[in-house]
Image: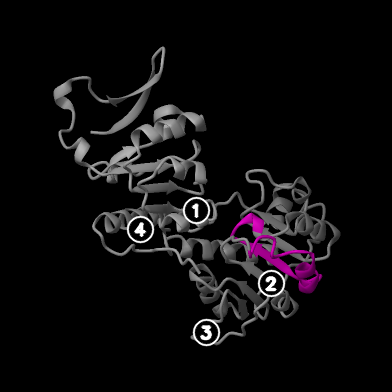
Amino acid sequence: MSYVYSLKKKKNPIQYTLTNLQSTMADSIDPNFHQKPLLVINRIPSFKFRFDHRLTPTFTIVDPITAVGTDSSAAHTFLRHNAAAARAVLCIGPSPLIKDTLDCLPSLECVVAHSVGYDHIDLSECRRRGISVANVGDAFSDDVADCAVGLLIDVLRKVSAAHRFVRAGSWPEQVAFPLGSRLGGKRVGIVGLGSIGSRVVKRLIPLGCSIAYTSRQKKPSVSFPYYAYVYDLALDCDILILCCSLTNQTRHMINEDVLNALGKEGVVINIGRGDLIDEKELVQFLVDGRIRGAGLDVFQNEPYVPKELFSLDNVVLSPHQAVLTPDSFMAAEDISVANLEAFFSNKPLVSPISWD
């Protein structure tokens, strides 16, 4: 049996009541309802909460979107009245979790992000309040790594461009098609040698690529050349693959200087976050032919993509799909549930984020 909170508007003031969505009979209400821990769902309307069936036996689900709709003021009022005792929040996808929402949850101790990235969460405020934060760890890593390599091969070998060429009927009229480039022998710079970056490397080495990397710290167990600065990495690479998380330090790390260092034959692949790149600069470099190409799964102002890129055959565009496979969805659900179970059992979180 599933329950949500609903809002009933009286003349004055607003009052909240608990509604059983499946029956109005009093004796059908779950007698253990009030004994279940509260779990707040933080999401924007476009993100669906698809695994509530795995949590409702254990938790009382408090979902402001279901209860009061999209009005943020109403949602905050709802949370203050109905979720003040909640100790945990499940954040669906990159739904912003801001200070105003945290202010409505004075008992909050844990945020479980149903995503790898956590730049949408006010981490400084969570840290100040002593709130633990977990993400889904490496649940998406294999699928994102596959996408990164796919984008790279597509850019170099012009797979999508050739597909459009054939489907447009241009082959019989124009026999010559621009040459692609071999992947083997390319110098690939990995920006962020974490879970995803390491898997990208495992896929590229058998294809004959040489690897170098930059990361927050040098990895003692890694033999690849390390560069403390992305600019220096770009000077010695043909390709940059962005696998790092978005922070104040990494925002717009791929800027005019780095793109100039990468050079005219350089390629940028981004499966991290759109704001890792100064998008206006990248667009101008691509339009002017000052780099070879780009494969982009993420953008600064999603779902809006710079129109200048639409006509460029050296650019492959993807609608933030790198993580979206049934396999990764199930893995993310498993880890999210495991984190919640660990927290409410007073055990260490399965995949806590690093505060460093």
Say if 203 sits above or below 245 in the image: below
Circle 2 crowding by C-alpha within 10 Å: few under 14, some 14–19, many from 20 = many
Task: Name the spot of residue 322 as percent of width and height, x first.
Answer: 54, 56
User: Per the image, is 258 magenta?
Assistant: yes
Secondary structure of residue under mark 2? strand
Task: Name the spot of residue 7 as percent of width and height, x first.
Answer: 38, 23
Question: Would residue 243 be visible to someone looking at this image?
Answer: yes
**Extreme right residue here?**
288
Q: Nearer the viewer, mark 1 or mark 3?
A: 1
Query: Mark 1 vs mark 3: which is more N-terminal?
Result: 1
Name the residue rendered at 86%, 59% in the picture.
288
| Real-space Cα separation, disc 2 to disc 4, in angstroms | 33 Å
Foreground residue among 218 and 315 = 218
Foreground residue among 169 and 145 = 145
Is residue 317 rendered to the left or right of residue 132? right
Question: Would residue 70 be visible to someone looking at this image?
Answer: no
Secondary structure of residue under mark 3? loop
- In this picture, which residue range is highlighted in magenta? 249-275
Report the residue marked by disc 1: 125
Circle 4 crowding by C-alpha within 10 Å: few under 14, some 14–19, many from 20 = many
Name the residue rendered at 48%, 48% in the picture.
93
| Real-space Cα separation, disc 1 to disc 4, in angstroms | 24 Å
Q: Nearer the viewer, mark 2 or mark 1?
A: 1
Is residue 337 rendered to the left or right of residue 323? left
The label shown at residue 335 is 4
| Real-space Cα separation, disc 2 to disc 1, in angstroms | 37 Å
Query: Mark 2 vs mark 1: which is more N-terminal?
Result: 1
Q: Nearer the viewer, mark 3 or mark 2?
A: 3
